[in-house]
Amino acid sequence: MRQRQWDRLLVKLIGIILVNALIATIAFLIMGYSISMYYIRNGTTPEPLTSNLAFLTVTFITIFIFIIGFSLMMRKTLRKITYLSSEIEQIASGDLGRTVEVEGRDELASLGQSVNWMSQQLQHLFEKERAHEEERNQLFSNLSHDLRTPLTSIRGYLQLLESERAMTDVERSHFNVLNEKTAQLEQLLEQLMDVNRLYSSQVILSKHQVNISLLTTQLVHEMGPLFEEANHHITSHVQPDLYIEADQDQLIRVFQNLMSNALKYATPDEPIELTLVQQDDHVLWQLRNQTTPQTIASIDHLFDRTYRVDASRGETPGDGLGLSIARQIMILHEGMLQAYPLAGDRICFEASFPIERGSDATSH
């Protein structure tokens, strides 16, 4: 059915071209005949230059007639195509559910109906996905609250057990393992609650001018001993006095998550490079390190909230909630956090901060 409609549109277009070509040809013949009769009546023969100029003039007039006729016949169709193109751009930019006005019963009207159907389907799918997202956020919230109570009880009983009796070495070893695992569960619970808050827009940023150069240098200095202890050598190349509008506490969290990720998963004894520069209208914070081929292969999933690979199977584990939280914080800052591969199984995590036009990132 669709193919037949487009075939009819093609036939219509060819018909318009043929009609205007016929009109232009008739006009060409009439003008050529008129010029010939003029010279015949006067009994003269035109010079070659005059003849060539006359031929070119007639040709240009013929082409002009063809263009004018084609434009007039296609004006309504071209206007519909322009209108549909504009409406489709609006839908593509996020105005889902937008409908176009359908006039007539031709092929473009059929295309308009298809655009309306597509727009309604996209809106339906978007609303359905948003409902699923709200359900997932609610599930995170319920799980977080449901787990907090038993963990609080476990923590209380551990403290009570430690204070009431002296433990043997074996008991102390078991107690330390239990205490450590409880702390890990509490940390994971906090991360789950943070994810829920960030994705449900419950976090209100407190933005102000932040010297991101000084902040980065301080973090490198603070975490330097941790990198040395893990046999990592980190070098920093920081452009001085770069300022951005940001929530400093959330910004520190992003950078700490990225640096902690490099600390855990970077290849030992390989250099880790941190750079901070301004490029055009963005400030780029980049962290590069050597990694495994498995991580490079799964680079498109590193920021997924639910992505985790079982490390016990010998595969590189996903970066989990930390990277997901970092990306969401960047989105709240209207920035971007991405990872891309470099040569030699190296990976680069890049946080990009936009600079408002008319402002200077180096100004204080």
Image (tube, rainbow, N blue to C red):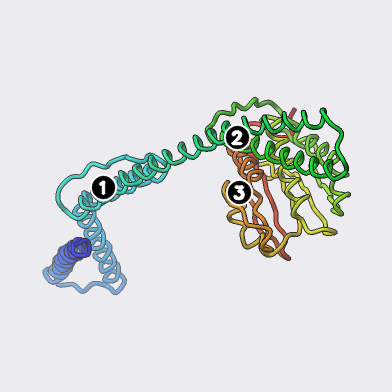
Q: Which residue is mark 2?
A: 147
Mark 3 Cα-neighbour bin, 10 Å: few <14, some 14–19, many ≥20: many
Q: Nearer the viewer, residue 142 or 137?
A: 142
Circle 2 SS class: helix
Q: Which mark is residue 79?
A: 1
Whole-angstrom CA distance, mark 3 to mark 1, is 44 Å
Q: Position of residue 71 (x, y in %)?
A: 24, 54
- Name the residue located 64 percent from the left edge and 37 percent from the top edge: 189
| Disc on the earlier residue, 2 or 3 | 2
Q: Position of residue 26 (x, y in %)?
A: 14, 66
Mark 1 Cα-neighbour bin, 10 Å: few <14, some 14–19, many ≥20: few
Circle 1 SS class: helix
Image quadrant assignment for residue 28: bottom left
Mark 2 Cα-neighbour bin, 10 Å: few <14, some 14–19, many ≥20: some
Q: Position of residue 91 (x, y in %)?
A: 37, 43
| Disc on the earlier residue, 2 or 1 | 1
Q: Amino acid at mark 2?
A: Leu
Circle 3 SS class: loop
Q: Is residue 14 left or right of residue 136?
A: left
Q: Which residue is mark 3?
A: 303
Q: Amino acid at mark 1?
A: Arg
**Which mark's residue is nearer the viewer, 2 or 3?**
2
Q: Is residue 42 visible?
A: no
Asked if disc 2 and disc 1 are in contact, CB closer than 8 Å, the reply is no
Image quadrant assignment for residue 322: top right
**Which mark's residue is nearer the viewer, 3 or 1?**
3
